[in-house]
Image (cartoon, helix red, strand yellow):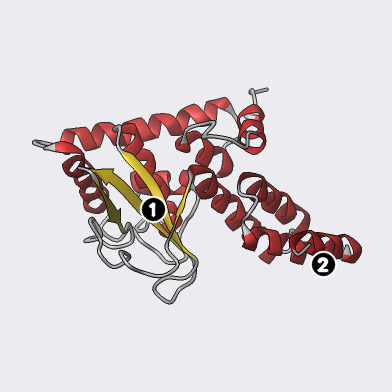
């Protein structure tokens, strides 16, 4: 029997301070990677993409140029990479990027795969977040620290490098890696709840909340799932903890 990666997930969910694991491993575990063998397989795929990017780079001057080369390679490799309801798991985004799929992911999937690759090249990237953007609900994008400034990278647009549209937008905030990984768990929970797997949905929401205790939607959706299971008393207590 293969060794499970439960310890990695335990570290993700119990360590409340700092970034206890790298974004790639954390996002892979959240995406469903369950064994060391599978983890190594996806890490190797990430390394494979890095080699492809290196081979496409000729001359760069600083972090901004390097970040732009990564962005350009992703879009040239998959010109139709964005899909509104597309994959959000890192595993699916990696497989789509390297495979024959036309689309790679939604804003979450594209932002995570970009940030993972950028980190592999030593770039300083974070995630930006809007509760509502483009009239389509929650949205994430990349924030790059380079040349003494912050550059927005909008991964859903082929011309989204140094995107100006979010600069002074209301509701803009910054997400840590923990919050970004929590969004994978929350999205999984939503899919499970929609398919009627309420107990499994609650478990995913709890993982999201453990990583991001202030994640209002995950908190609310856990209560909704408890109600749909008929656990009304428990749901009532849960909602009360949200509004003490």
In the displayed structure, 85 sits above or below 6; it is below
User: Who is closer to the viewer here, 197 or 163?
Assistant: 163
Q: Earlier in the sequence, mark 2 or mark 1?
A: 1
Q: Secondary structure at mark 1?
A: helix
Going by the picture, which residue comes out furthest to the left? Answer: 59
Residue topped by disc 2 = 227
x, y percentage for residue 82? 35, 61
Count the marks.
2
Q: Residues within 10 Å of mark 1 (few under 14, many from 20)?
A: many
Query: Residue 213: in sight, yes or no?
Result: yes
Q: Residue at x 41, y 44 (%)?
A: 94
Going by the picture, which residue comes out furthest to the right? Answer: 233
Q: Residues within 10 Å of mark 2 (few under 14, many from 20)?
A: some
Q: Secondary structure at mark 2?
A: helix
Residue topped by disc 1 = 110
Query: Residue 229: in sight, yes or no?
Result: no
Q: CA distance from mark 2 to mark 1?
A: 33 Å
x, y percentage for residue 243? 75, 64
x, y percentage for residue 240? 81, 63
């Amino acid at each position: 029997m293969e060794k499970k990666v439960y310890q990695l997930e335990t570290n993700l969910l119990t360590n409340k301070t700092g970034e206890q694991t790298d974004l790639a491993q954390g996002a892979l575990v959240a995406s469903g990677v369950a064994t060391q063998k599978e983890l190594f397989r996806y890490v190797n795929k990430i390394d494979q993409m890095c080699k492809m990017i290196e081979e496409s780079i000729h001359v760069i001057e600083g972090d901004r140029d390097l970040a732009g080369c990564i962005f350009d390679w992703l879009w040239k490799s998959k010109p139709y990479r964005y899909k509104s309801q597309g994959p959000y798991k890192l595993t699916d985004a990696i497989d789509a990027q390297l495979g024959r799929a036309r689309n790679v992911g939604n804003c979450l999937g594209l932002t995570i795969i970009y940030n993972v690759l950028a980190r592999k090249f030593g770039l300083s990237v974070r995630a930006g977040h809007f509760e509502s953007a483009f009239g389509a609900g929650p949205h994430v994008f990349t924030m790059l620290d380079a040349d003494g400034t912050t550059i927005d990278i909008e991964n859903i647009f082929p011309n989204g490098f140094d995107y100006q549209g979010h600069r002074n937008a209301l509701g803009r905030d910054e997400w840590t890696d923990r919050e970004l990984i929590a969004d994978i768990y929350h999205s999984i929970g939503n899919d499970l709840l929609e398919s009627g797997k309420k107990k499994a949905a609650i478990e995913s929401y709890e993982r999201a909340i453990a990583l991001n205790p202030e994640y209002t939607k995950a908190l609310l959706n856990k209560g909704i799932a408890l109600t749909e299971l008929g656990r009304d008393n428990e749901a009532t207590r849960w909602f009360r903890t949200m509004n003490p």
